[in-house]
Image (cartoon, rainbow, N blue to C red):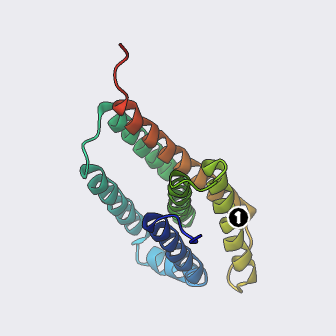
Amino acid sequence: MPLFSSRRERRLWIATLLVLIAIYATLGLAPRLAGLLRQSGLIGISFTLGLVLTAVAILLHGLRRRAGKTEVFVWVGIAAAYLLLFARIQLPEERSHLIEYSLVAVLIFEALRERKQQGRHVPLPALLALLISSLLGLVDEGIQALLPNRVFDPLDLLFNFLAALMAITASSALSWARNFRRKPPAT
């Protein structure tokens, strides 16, 4: 039996691996980069630009198909929740956890859902994706504990977990909204 159930699952796992490599490879560089951006007054702008680029990518993805009213309302709710959380997080470095582990969690969740849809046994894909994402966040913090200019921060574990939970919940809500509009009216 092949390792992957489909090409899509394979692509999702490869994307997850690439994102994790990018996260882990920049752990030593991140404080210096944040310091340079802060000194030049560009840290707020850089995170705003990242947020705008993410929103544009989501919007372009959404435009590939026509969304129903329910799906649009769910999208607006998700965007509002992320924007409010972004506004409440004071340190830009902490905002990066929201972006990084939301992306990791969604990629893992989609890979597990694809695997299950292809007939493979995947118990509770949402819970499994949350567990895997949280463990990868723990690896992130473990690597930081080994770096001379970084520390293990339990609060970051919480941020990673909450970002993963929020992303998986948002993805599940969008799936529900898409299926909601496809159901035929009751007769």
**Residue at x-position 62% and y-position 56%:** 129
User: Where is residue 98, by image quadrant?
Assistant: bottom right
Could you tell me residue 27's position as x and y percent?
60, 79
**Residue at x-position 40% and y-position 31%:** 180
Q: Residues within 10 Å of mark 1 (few under 14, many from 20)?
A: some
Q: Nearer the viewer, residue 184 or 26?
A: 184
Q: Nearer the viewer, residue 63 or 91?
A: 63
Q: Is residue 69 above or below residue 16?
A: above
User: Where is residue 131, by image quadrant?
Assistant: bottom right
**As drawn, is 27 to the left or to the right of 71?**
right
**As drawn, is 106 to the left or to the right of 46?**
right
Question: Which residue bears the numbered disc 1?
Answer: 135
Q: Amino acid at mark 1?
A: Leu
Q: Nearer the viewer, residue 83 or 102?
A: 102
Residue furthest toward the front?
A: 1
Could you tell me residue 24's position as x and y percent?
59, 78
Residue furthest toward the bottom?
A: 148
Secondary structure beneath dot 1 equals: helix
**Residue at x-position 40% and y-position 45%:** 79
User: Where is residue 128, by image quadrant?
Assistant: bottom right
Residue furthest toward the top?
A: 187
Could you tell me residue 29's position as x and y percent?
55, 84
Q: Is residue 112 visible?
A: yes
**As drawn, is 144 to the left or to the right of 184?**
right
Q: Is residue 34 above or below residue 123?
A: below
Could you tell me residue 12's position as x and y percent?
48, 66
Q: Is residue 130 above or below residue 31?
A: above
Give the quarter of the figure containing the C terminus. Answer: top left
